[in-house]
Amino acid sequence: MNVLLFALGSHGDVHPFVGLGIRLRQRGHHVAVATNEYFKPLVEHAQLEFIECGTAAEYTKLATNPDLWHPMKSIQAVFHGTARYLRPMYEIARDFAQRDDAVIVASSLAMGARVAQDKHGFTMASVHLSPSIFQSIHEPPKLPGLSLVSGWAPLWVMRGLFKFTNVVVDSVIAPQLNELRRELGLPPVRNILRDYWHAPQLVIALFPDWFGAKQPDWPAQTRLTGFPLYDEPDLSPISPELDRFIDAGDPRMPPIAFTPGSAMWNGRKFFDASVDACVRLNRRGLLLTRHRDHLPETLPANVINVHYAPFSQLLPRCAAFVHHAGIGSTAQALAAGVPQLLTPFTHDQPDNSARVVKLGCGVIVRPSKYTGPRVAAALARLIDDARVAATCRDVKSRFAGVDAIDQTCDLIEQLGAQRSQDRRPVGHNEEALTGTR
């Protein structure tokens, strides 16, 4: 097969597709990854074909937009920032579909590829990384505007809230999406986040059912595989400096790792409070960020800055992990069996953090409450809690023998084998086109 993977977003969004591409290549398929130029070295190091979808300068401009981390403004920032790629995505998918045995796999934001599928009828799967992508009145995701009523409101209230939410979101996304469709002779779509961004042939959810069980009102074509867990260990292994720092301390008091996420370009407040917490606890700290200007000018002797380290190698050697609850960081922490202190900002983070707490593997400190004293107190309780430690070990055991990337490759190969049967005429996704369910 010729497989095209659309991977839009930050490192946490791109890593799963690179890991998937490596495994597909090892199975004998040709794999191309369409993503931002910022990630070109990562894609090419994995020996995958790189197709540019946006420049590194454009990525930096979007990543440095403070609205990207605002609970209510983030969705507008994301979709306005990626709308410029609708036509490029359409053209990339259209052209790639002409290759022999082509199969296209698109991330959540790759809606230009969905337009190309509607226009040209090629084989495609959607891949979603977190449960919050799916709207459900049975288990509503903990999202801004919904978290206060999720879990107790009657179904009719949740239906009304989602209806209102879809109208608001459509007002942000639909104009440019439907303008492209109009130019291509396609009818307009609505209820985009409820229906349209799910490919009608196959939707792959890259998380396990014990983290986010499939709900009755999710798309019927959804298949859950599990957390992919790829974090470029071959490209960026733990450095000798970091290895020495970890080994040099008391083995009974491993360091604590801190990160606000790879896409966070405004992390000074987070790191100032994190350093203060380490000093108060007299614990070693690892500040994970590529942005040295986010850190205090001088760091205590027991705290170091780490530009990057594969979480799969680092977290099993840590006492706790403090992070933003992005799905990639969350999955790696669960796999490592390490307690988590979560400070969710927006996007899928509030929902992911709520699921970690429900599992019994962590606690939440809201960004507005993220101060040195509060973080130190929360970490002291978390690290000393025997029940949390036991639960983390139990959850870690659930990863044994599970290869989510292999399972996902199986689904993509099955889709490729069915492509001759699944070529449908334009307009086949009637549910999304009419907005009915």
Image: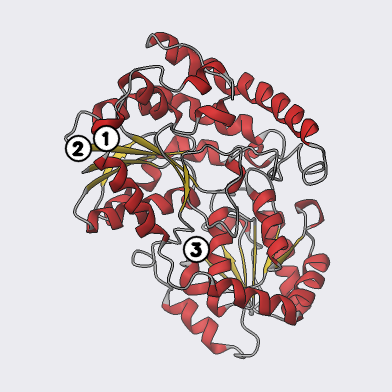
Q: Name the amino acid type tagged 2.
A: Asp
For the residue pair 14 and 418, the one nearer the viewer reads as 418
Q: Residue at x 41, y 42 (%)?
A: 7
Q: Please tell me whether residue 370 is drawn above or below residue 13 in the rendered image.
A: below
Q: Upstream in the sequence, badge 3 or badge 1?
A: 3
Query: Relative to residue 31, is residue 386 drawn left or right?
Result: right
Which element carries disc 1, helix, strand or loop? Answer: helix
Q: Is residue 234 visible?
A: yes
Q: CA distance from mark 1 to mark 2?
A: 8 Å
Q: Nearer the viewer, mark 3 or mark 1?
A: 1
Residue denoted by label 1: 419
Estimate the x, y position of residue 171 in percent, counting from the top left.
Answer: 63, 19
Q: CA distance from mark 3 to mark 1?
A: 43 Å
Residue denoted by label 2: 101
Q: Name the amino acid type tagged 1.
A: Arg
Estimate the x, y position of residue 43 in percent, counting from the top left.
Answer: 32, 50
Task: Name the image quarter holding the N terminus.
Answer: top left
Q: Please tell me whether residue 356 is drawn above or below residue 175 in the rendered image.
A: below
Disc 3 + disc 2, Cβ < 8 Å: no
Query: Relative to residue 192, is residue 35 drawn left or right?
Result: left
Disc 1 + disc 2, Cβ < 8 Å: yes
Q: Name the amino acid type tagged 3.
A: His
Estimate the x, y position of residue 124 in percent, counting from the top left.
Answer: 35, 35
Q: Nearer the viewer, mark 3 or mark 2?
A: 2
